[in-house]
Image (tube, rainbow, N blue to C red):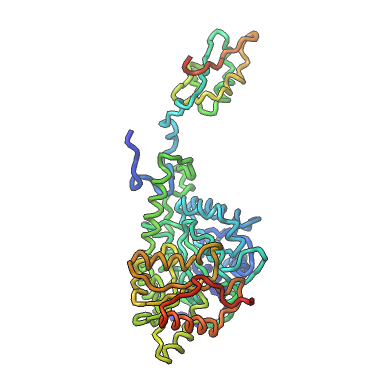
Amino acid sequence: MKLKGWKELEIGAIIPEAGNAEQYNTGSWRASRPQWIEENCIQCLFCWIYCPDSSVTVKDGKRGEFDYGHCKGCGVCAHECPGKKGKKAIVMVEEGN
Amino acid sequence: MGKKLAITGNQALAEAMKQINPDVCAAYPITPSTEIMQRFASFVSDGVVDTELVTVESEHSAMSACIGASAAGGRVMTATSSQGLALMWEMLHIASGMRLPIAMTLVNRALSAPINIHGDHSDGMGSRDCGWIQLYSENAQEAYDNIFQAVRIAEHEDVRLPAMVCMDGFIISHSIESMEFLPDEVIRDFIGEFKPKYPLLDIDKPVTYGPLVLTDFYIEFKKAQHEAINKAKKVTLEVAREFEKISGRSYGLFEPYRLEDADIAIVLLNSAAGTAKDVVDAFRDKGIRVGLLKPRLFRPFPYEEVAEALSNAKVICVFDRADSFGGFGPMYMEIASAMMASGSSPLMVNKIYGLGGRDFMPEDAAAVIKELTEILDTGKTGILKEYIGVRE
């Protein structure tokens, strides 16, 4: 991507377009990746509530796969996940493994 | 023609703010600027202005509230001095970096310690690098005239930067002198309506102010800011020409006084320049070719124009009412840069005077001009940076 030059930027670093954080791929920052284990998931949606980057996709009231384009790998979802019968539905896995 | 009144500098600026009728003022009182906001607060409570006056718990908050109000889309003003400006320091950069055209009156006062309430330029010079446009004023009339022009310069499409108008604490702020006011409707037409660029209150067009900008874009924004403040020079002259039409008073980037054929030039800011003009006249009567340059627009600094105005001077003394400890005074550094860049090499000395409001008397100016005549004769400068009017 060609970065804008100084003449092309908005005055005072203002962002005139609402919601454009979606265009910023923060997933590249991740050191560890949350992994969803569907059989342990009770669909409480705590992960969706707690995720600071809206990286838990939800359709028809049910969670689906992570949005790895934006997940920074903070691990909040894995921490909050109650799991089922002592088994977590989200575990953190080191990237590159 | 407007009415003529005998009035203090602070009263003049309070009246000017009344005529500007800003949308929002956020301020915290500090000597010697307090009276401006005290009087303006009366205008607010009497319903003479439509301004939302935000009384805050510190100058840091005052500038923060000004930034918020300006980003929201209002025409915003504040007033301060000395420690107040120092406490605003962090937010001054944010106002200029966000390109918010806030207008401020700065009644110049010394900085602590030791604590001192009187006039010197340590506060204004200390905020030199904060990205604000700075206009300095010799007297109440100039301060009054400058604040309207500052609003226009700050809000100009090519500039969009905050601006401060400076005048000397007590010497001008609390002294009564005769000056001319312009009629309200003339001021209203001159400043026009403020057109905000990205008002936060426009909920149909949501924008973000103050995002994180790192190595990939920060320097591009600073380059844009550098270009914008440099444009303020041309805009200042355009606005001054318009102002002359409504007032009959002419302003430039600086005021040259008997400078054209001067061998000896002195550079003096604000009220002391008025004192020194009489002394220049007295030396001229004796056949000594001395002239004075009184800077007006200090940021952006008009290097080429100043160098051109001083190009015939063989000896220059720059007076500074502020010190950059361990360096030359801030004004000296600008004048030296201007001369160096222009390729001329006059003999230059720097006198630090009047700190903490110490009087600058005609005899002080005379003693320095006499010394400059000796430098002109001998070609030797002696001590380059020296305090004057100080006891041994």
Q: Is residue B227 visible?
A: yes
Expressed as whole percent of the image width and height from the top left, the position of residue A94 reads 52, 17
Q: Is residue A69 above or below residue B212?
A: above
Residue name at image x 52 percent, y 77 percent: B271
Expressed as whole percent of the image width and height from the top left, the position of residue B337 reads 40, 64
Q: Is residue A26 left or right of residue B110?
A: left
Expressed as whole percent of the image width and height from the top left, the position of residue B353 reads 55, 74
Task: In this rendered view, identify the residue nearer to me: B44 or A19.
Answer: A19
Q: Is residue B50 visible?
A: no
Expressed as whole percent of the image width and height from the top left, the position of residue A17 reads 41, 39
The total number of labels drawn is: 0
Task: In this rendered view, identify the residue nearer to me: A40 or A25.
Answer: A25
Q: Residue furthest bottom?
A: B286
Q: Quadrant of the C terminus of chain B?
A: bottom right
Residue name at image x 45 percent, y 83 percent: B374
Q: Is residue B368 left or right of residue B84?
A: left
Q: Quadrant of the N terminus of chain B?
A: bottom left
Task: In this rendered view, identify the residue nearer to me: B313 or A18.
Answer: B313
Q: Is residue B103 above or below residue B308?
A: above
